[in-house]
Image (tube, rainbow, N blue to C red):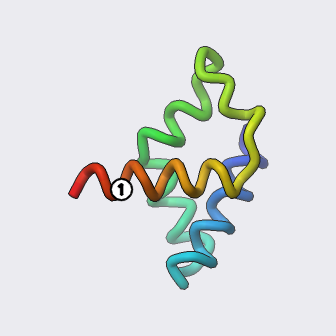
Amino acid sequence: MQLLAAMTSEEIAKRKNISKIEAFDIFMQSETAEMLFNDEFVLWWNGPVYLAEMYEKEMISKK
């Protein structure tokens, strides 16, 4: 799951044009990341693009 979180952060960094470290920090503070590390949700079956889209939807819903 850690590798998937890192790969998702890279995808977010590309989309937002920010550093990978900054993307990792903001992703790890999200509900999406929390769900990724919760085995009940089985999000590790999905790829980083799916998780980045899920993260983006989460951020839109918080506005």
Question: What residue did someone put label 1 on?
Answer: 59
Q: Which quarter of the figure is the C terminus placed in? A: bottom left
Q: Position of residue 45 (x, y in %)?
A: 77, 33
What is the residue that sits farthest to the top in this orientation?
40
Q: Which quarter of the figure is the N terminus placed in? A: top right
Q: Secondary structure at mark 1?
A: helix
Question: How many numbered markers are drawn?
Answer: 1
Residue at x-position 49% and y-position 60%: 25
Q: Is residue 62 above or below residue 19?
A: above
Residue at x-position 60% and y-position 15%: 40
* Circle 1 crowding by C-alpha within 10 Å: few under 14, some 14–19, many from 20: few
Name the side, left or right, on which 18 lies relative to 51: left
Name the side, left or right, on which 6 lies relative to 54: right
Q: Is residue 49 above or below residue 5?
A: below
What is the residue that sits farthest to the bottom in this orientation?
17
Residue at x-position 60% and y-position 22%: 41
Q: Nearer the viewer, residue 54 or 5?
A: 54
**Amino acid identity at mark 1:** Met
Q: Is residue 46 above or below residue 8?
A: above
Residue at x-position 50% and y-position 34%: 34
Q: Position of residue 51 (x, y in %)?
A: 61, 49
Q: Position of residue 17 (x, y in %)?
A: 54, 84
